[in-house]
Amino acid sequence: MTPDEMEARIVRYGDLKPCRTAFIDAHTPGSDKKENFAIIGGGVAENADQHIHIRETPGFNVGAAGQPPKCRNSLHSHRTAEVFFVLKGRWRFFWGRWGTAGEVVLEEGDIINIPTGIFRGFENVGTDYGMIMAILGGDDAGGGVIWAPQVIEDALGHGLVLGENGVLYDRKRGQALPDDVAPMPVLSEDDLKAYPEPEIRKIVRNCVARYWDLVALAAEEPCKVIGETGLLRDKPGFEVEFLTSGSRNSPVYSLDRHEVLMILHGHWKLAWAAGEKTLAPGDTCAVPPGLEHSLRPSMSGEASLYRVMNTDDPAGPTWEGV
């Protein structure tokens, strides 16, 4: 692999291209300032205007959401895993039919594995523009978003309608549903009974890992955060590990599966026989299977990253113990 070929597999934070109308709540007051990013795979964006940086998926999708203070993402659900870690800022995650079943605030570096089948939303409660990075299970990310009924109804009043084909139509831009496409149906009251509202203690205990705890756990070797034997036990079709400057790793190694590096703090040197690249905070790098390479911090100081790897597990519902 040449350096240019590797560079094509790196999405630099400073090169991220946002979409401001990716989802049905893009015009709804309180949610109309958010930016969505499709880093690896198209994710679950409902607008063809969403730029996709790397189209080839490794069994999961990687994306991001950037929002100014007090901006929120509306209540929705997924059929596969949705994992977030905070890259910048302070974020409140909330869940339940009306978003009132519980909430937890996450700081930079914290990670949450949100269970499938519950309505969830998130809000930037910091003082500056914030960014959260997302990992979605499956190559097709579960086939789309399931919105709480009030989200679809509110959006309609602001000119946006979602077709049952999963495509968003913006009346403010002169768009209309095609004659052969019906609106996305709203969940009935009977449908809504299938969406649980987990207790706060269960979400915090089983689905949240705090950055400084991970730093301590990864002081000598990588810490498995999400996986069958991970700190957050789950089998969502991928595993997540946490590495710091103290994590021991073989000087040169290769994996028989995809490896996606998501840099949190510091600068990391990725080296292989044909070259080397430096990865900075917010960068995402897709290392192909079978490539012998090394990974180490390139300078002293705090350095940490999340490493995501595909598994043979199906990208279906997440752990049911919540």
Image: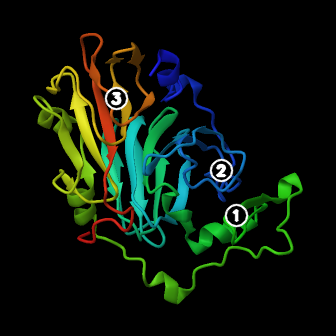
Inter-mark Cα distance, 2 to 3: 35 Å
Observer-nearest residue: 32 or 283? 283
Residue 280 x/y as whole percent: 41, 20
Q: Vertical placement of 221 versus 208: above or below?
A: above
Residue at the image position 58 percent from the left and 25 percent from the top: 15
Q: Quadrant of residue 164?
A: bottom right
Q: Quadrant of residue 205?
A: bottom left
Task: Provide the secondary structure element on which disc 1 rests.
Answer: helix
Inter-mark Cα distance, 3 to 1: 46 Å
Q: Look at label 3 and name its amino acid.
A: Leu
Q: Earlier in the sequence, mark 2 or mark 3?
A: 2
Task: Provide the secondary structure element on which disc 2 rests.
Answer: loop
Q: Which mark is residue 214?
A: none
Q: Earlier in the sequence, mark 2 or mark 1?
A: 2
Q: Vertical placement of 188 versus 141: above or below?
A: below
Q: Earlier in the sequence, mark 3 or mark 1?
A: 1
Observer-nearest residue: 159 or 140? 140
Disc 2: which residue: 22
Task: Specify whether 134 is left or right of 170.
Answer: left
Which colour style is shown?
rainbow
Disc 3: which residue: 291
Disc 1: which residue: 155
Residue at the image position 44 percent from the left and 38 percent from the top: 126
Residue 163 x/y as whole percent: 72, 69
Within 10 angstroms of label 3, few (less than 14), some, or many (20 or more) residues?
Answer: some
Task: Provide the secondary structure element on which disc 3 rests.
Answer: loop
Task: Specify whether 164 is left or right of 255.
Answer: right
Query: Which residue is outermost to the right?
Result: 174
The N terminus: image quadrant: top left
Q: Vertical placement of 146 versus 254: above or below?
A: below
